Image: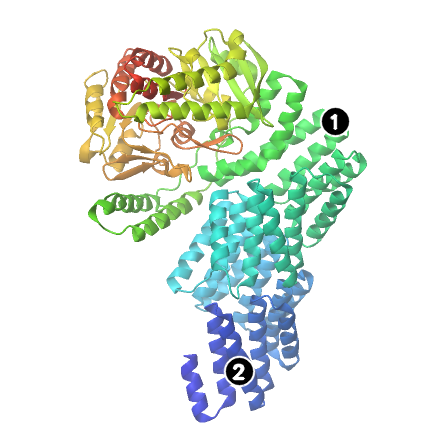
Amino acid sequence: MGRSALRAARASGDDEEASAAERAIGLAWRELHDFDAALRHLRRSVRLAERAGSARAAALARMSMAFVLSNTGRHAQALRAINEALPHLRGVDAGSGRMQRGLVLHYLCRYDEALREYNGAIEVVRRFGERLVEARALNNRGLLRAYTGGLRAADEDFDRAAVLYRDLDQALAVADVRWNAGISASRAGDVPRALTMFAEAEREYRRLAVPRPALLINRLELLVSVPLLEEARAAADRALEELGGDLVLARSEALFYRARIALLEGDLDLAVRMAAAARKGFRREKRDVWAEGARHVELRAAYLSGQRTRALVTALTGVASRLDALGWRMAGLEARVDAALVARDLGDRSRAVAELTTAGAARRGGPAAHRVQGWYAEALRRDLLGNARGAQIALRRGLALLDEYRVSLGATELRALSGAQGAALASEGLRTAVAGGRAGRVLSWAEAWRAGALRMTPARPPEDSGLADALAELRAVTADLEVAPTAGRPTAVLRQRQVRGEQRVRELTRQAGGGGAVFKPPAVGELARALGTSALVEYVDHEGELLAVVVAGGRASLHRLGPLDGALRELRLLRFALHRLVTLPEHVDRTAVRAGAEHAARLLQNRLLGPLRRRLDDRPLVLAPTGRLGGLPWSALPACRGRAVTVVPSATVWLRAATSTLVSHDRAVLAAGPRLPAAPTEITAISSLGSVPASVLVGGAATVDAVASAMDGAPLAHVAAHGSFRADNPLFSALELADGPLTVYDLERLRTPPALVVLSACDSGLSAVRPGDEVMGFTAALLGLGTRTLVAPVIPVPAEVTTPLMVDLHRRLGQGQAPAVALAGAQEAHRGDGDAAFAASAGFLCFGA
């Protein structure tokens, strides 16, 4: 349209009309992110307006040019252009000019001046009834307020702007407002709302076919805040690839967030490199607050690397004050606490107390993350002043506040990953408890942070959320991917659809509303009563040292087991040897491999159970391994063979499962997946035991919907299928059924999960472990939903070898044996059936109660 108007203006010799057409073309190129083309046309617009003698038209073109110059980081030029334009603008035009000047000042982080310009612009255009410019100014002012802490006022601006834009039929602008409202929600800590707003806006951008590559950055801030680190890392790397050329502002921010991700992942060298590059960009762009944020990342990396100097204290304190003044309160809090910790380590108690006093004030208001950090600072301050009891109270208040926040998130994934925000509080509490040497207190602090997401009542997405359709679409794509290679069809497009489908499922589940209860960690006495004659062993990773708290015979004891790294090395050896025993061809001699497995098992037993043998005697065991010991096939350890062993994420989770209502196994769901010849045989053999009525689903009848529907409310479910564990996204770990994968997301839609679940599928008992020993996978999903007991393997298990074990397990369950007792008996009975049977049977664990 602009080009057509330009041709007509040239034909009639009307330079003012031609100037307007050039300006329209320039703004169109700006929306398409071709900033060079935009500036070319806008400069032509200025020249044509000047030749026509129209000061107003030239000023309007300069105003638009300032907008584009700011987009490309040339703020000084932008400010000159807008200042040159303003004297020639009147009425509504003057209001637009002030709004544009406010935007340039906003980019320059001169927030007070920007706010004055926005306020002035809104006042002017309201007098003239110019709703479009008012909406733009409100949207910009709302974003400014979101970044400087005025979150409620920001939302009011966004709401008003959205109404005006809708009345004016400005669909693209409504999407922009929705996206900015997502930024405000993110800064307020309302993750589900932020994700919802971002997803709605992104769908609208796609519908309108308008590119918004820089919006990757705003989502990055949210992903880092949770933190969803794997997704954030992928998004940051993608942003750094795509945001080249004139999108310099977004690229600097991508470098900044990549530095923060590296910091959270412990890659300090990368964090410093990325932060330095980001800071250089921000300084070039005159963006002071962002430059201070990047400097904070560099200084925090220095602190985490062990640097302790007075210069570092001074630098951190200076950055904290500047970040506070510029509205970045969370980063300022972190920098101030770091400064205090360095001062403490240098023996400067008075300075440490002063900084912690300032930081501790954040506990009284603001977003939850700020208050949690404030309570951490207050705990450190009280500890420095000799108030140990007060410090413990402050730490627990901080963790309780974090639990309240995590409950509000709803989605299991967000609850689990946000536990990382409590690391500092939990570590400080555990440090003081270990120093005191009291087993009960160590257990209490270990439980206060461990597997916190499983201490919360589950939140499920509403039935009309679209999740069922999204999961069905994803299954169809996955099924097509399975057959495409053998059919000679290309897979690239299908894989892209699979990635988009998985992202859609994640978005829908993350938007689930939160709420519900948080189960408090039990006291030692409560655990002892519930354990009866059993013994609980909770393993704790404390600064690289492995500790064990044993609760048995009515009392707790604390044991030091040496470096955790040794146990992890032996665990890798054992898993490797068992995997070899299962997968080696039958004609290959397995003697050496079997000896290697037995050797690794003895080493692990000597390390993990040997020092505890006097406390454990021959009691049934409840084992709560620290997350890095997840995947340990405990049944392979000599002391566990033939012994009832239950594995749990935490003592709290065990108590919840153990005290849940017992359900008699008067109905069973038995399902077999495809491409596994032994699976129907296994199901037939179990169903023939005839101990309880069974719904048998095999072949084409074993679809995801049919199996999930049958499982809902069933006392007993057994699924024999191919299993896959997704370390990159454990909630997409799957059991292969007739029409595609049954994932953890499908299980989370169950209203009443089975009381007892048996999964005869490779690796289905494995869990991904995140900070706080948060586990993610089938085990966490089922126990979190309320399943009392899960029996599943933590290594690959061939069905033809495990079928006799599974049939024996069900025979014993039918005789009334408890699951752990039944599993131990079946394993012992079939341990001598050959090396593969030994390895496969040892891979099964009883989780829960």
Expressed as whole percent of the image width and height from the top left, the position of residue 561 reads 56, 18
Q: How is the image coloured?
A: rainbow
| Circle 1 residues within 10 Å: few <14, some 14–19, many ≥20 | few
Pointer 1: what residue? 387
Report the disc number at residue 44.
Answer: 2
- Pick the front one: 276 or 384: 276
Name the element at disc 1: loop
Give the image quarter of residue 437: top right
**Residues at circles 1 and 2 in contact by the CB criterion of under 8 Å:** no
Q: Quadrant of residue 739?
A: top left
Q: Secondary structure at mark 2?
A: helix
Q: Image height check: is 299 above or below 800?
A: below
Camera-nearest residue between 197 and 255: 255
Q: Quadrant of the N terminus?
A: bottom left
Would you call the spot at circle 2 few (<14 residues within 10 Å), some (14-19), or many (20 or more)? some
Q: Nearer the viewer, residue 567 or 405?
A: 567
Where in the figure is residue 182, as x and y percent of width and height? Answer: 51, 53
Using the rendered view, name the quadrant where residue 82 is placed: bottom right
Residue 436 in sight in this render: yes
Mark 1 to mark 2: distance in Å?
71 Å
Residue projecting furthest to the bottom = 12
Give residue 497's position: percent from left, percent from top.
Answer: 33, 51
Amino acid type of disc 2? Arg
- Asked if residue 62 lies left or right of residue 675, the reply is right
